[in-house]
Structure formats: C-alpha cells, structure tokens
Image (cartoon, rainbow, N blue to C red):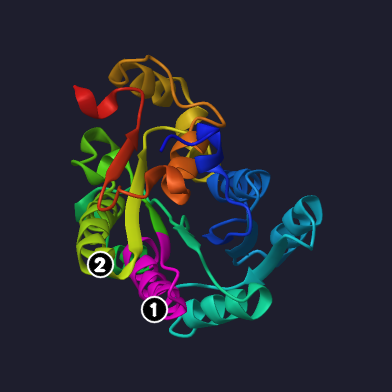
Amino acid sequence: MSPSNPADQFRLDSRVCVVTGASSGLGARFARVLVAAGASVVVAARRAERLADLVAELGEDVAHAVAVDVTTPEGPKMLIDAAIERFGRIDVLVNNAGSSNVAPALDYTAEEFRSEIELNLIAPYALSRLAAAAMIASGAGGVVINLGSILGHGGGGKLKVPGYAASKGGVHNLTRELASEWASKGVRVNAIAPAWFQTEMNDEMFGTDGGMKYITDNTPMRRPGNEGELDGALLFLASDASTYVTGHVLNVDGGWTAV
C-alpha cells in the first residue's frame, strides 16, 4: 500500500539519536537536522562549552550534551549509558567524530597513525557494538550511520593522509561487516562518504588557492559540497525511508568517485 504522504518516511518523531563529534562542523549540523525531523538528540564531543551552546539552541527538552572522549576505555560506555539514562533508549547512532592529519607516511610515526585509527575506527566500533546491543535488547532494532570518506575508497595521492585513508577504508568495510552480522537482529548499518565539505578539520585546504584548485579540478561538479547537501543522505539512512538498505556506503561527492 502506498503511503498517504511519502515524505512522512523521512520523519524521526520520537526517535532518539546519538551524534559524536557534535561540537562543530558536520556533527553540529547533523544534530540540528535530526531535531528538525522530530528526533531527540544526545550530542557528544570533548568541548563541553560548545555542546552547551548547541543544547541551548536546540532546547533541553530534545537535546542533551555529554562531554566525553570516545577514545578512552570508558568513554563509549559512558556515552551510551548517558543517552539511555536521559531518553530511555537509542534508535540511531551517528559515528561522526574524527580527525585528519596530513603528513607523508615516512614522516608519520606509528604512534601518530595509531592515535588516528583510535578515533576514526576503533571508537566507532566500540560505540556501535554498545549501541547495537541496546537496540537489540529493546526489541525495536535501530540504525548505525558511520561517517566514511571518499578517501576510504582509495589513496589520498598528493594529500598524504595515511592514517585518515586507512581508517576510513576500515570504516567502510566495518560498515559492511556489522551490517551483515546484525541485519537479522533489526539493526541496519550504513555509511556516508562525503567529498569536500568545509569544516574546522579542513579549513587549511579551503583557505588556499591550491587547495581549492585541487578540489575543483578533481570534482566533476567543479565545486565542493555546500552546507546542507549531506542532510538528505543523513535523513534517508536514519529514517524509515531506508528500511531495506544496510551495508551501503553512500557517496555524496559531486562525482569524485565516478571518474
């Protein structure tokens, strides 16, 4: 039977979403979009004052801040427990927290590499398994959305980002693995792989003529992504619009990976 209003599939009324890396950039945007679609959100990051400002903007009735370092042994459990304590459950986890360090591999120590893998890959795994356990135990299932990257599909080339490229490639295949393990349990796992969207993490790239030329020359649309151009992908994967989609890496890249 056709829905009376197909747009209703994208609503998130009464859903509870957890967003990591929410103190700025894409994470803060994601929190705003999820609330606008009807969800309550738990926003997590290390910068407590930024989170407090975001909660004040969104409203304490629908938003809750957890200042946490998800790379610590206790961080992931603390976040998941805090979300359940505040709102009673978790329906959607958005693993957005991450970092990118530019350095040639010969100059990038194993310890620096390990630190980047810890935030970009191990923390999402730790959070996903805890959130999925709660989703499965509730009987309602849920959704995990990982933030990958176009650089998870191949090497960075001139960019020289060994830790970032390796971790995002891992995120993509972790997405497929967890999706295959949890599909029968009612938990869907997908990823968004953006191309170039301006955030604090890549301000230097956007702030130079050479950086912008690299982006425009290598993107078939000849421009970076604009604010809001990830909103649709997020809502699609978080909502009932994608109930038969799991294990998918959705590129939002202006054609970058098509050529």
Q: Compare residues 24 and 81 and report the one nearer the observer.
A: 81
Q: Residue shown at 29%/69% (left/top)?
A: 114
Quadrant into which the C terminus falls: top left
* Nearer to the camera, 256 or 232: 232
Instruction: Say what amino acid the circle numbered 2 marks.
Output: Ser
Residue 36 in the image, given as x and y percentages of width and height: 67, 44
Where is residue 12? Give x, y as percent: 58, 50
Q: CA distance from mark 1 to mark 2?
A: 13 Å
Tag shown at residue 184: 2
Number of numbered callouts drawn: 2
Q: Is residue 221 magenta?
A: no
Considering the numbered disc 1 on the image, is that residue within a helix, a strand or a loop? Answer: helix
Left or right: where 132 falls relative to 177: right
Kindly tell me whether residue 160 is visible in this rendering. no
**How many residues crowd around disc 2 within 10 Å: few (fewer than 14), some, or many (20 or more)?**
few
Q: Is residue 120 magenta?
A: yes
Q: What percent of the width, then of the height, locates residue 168?
A: 29, 52
Dividing the picture into quadrants, the one containing residue 167 is: bottom left
Q: Amino acid at mark 1?
A: Ala
Outermost residue on the front side: it is: 1
Per the image, the residue denoted by label 1 is 133
Range of magenta residues: 119-143
Mark 1 or 2, nearer chain start: 1
Residue 144 seen from this side: yes
Crowd rating for badge 1 (residues with CA inside 10 Å; few <14, some 14–19, many 20+):
some
Q: Nearer the viewer, mark 1 or mark 2?
A: 2
**Disc 2, SS:** helix
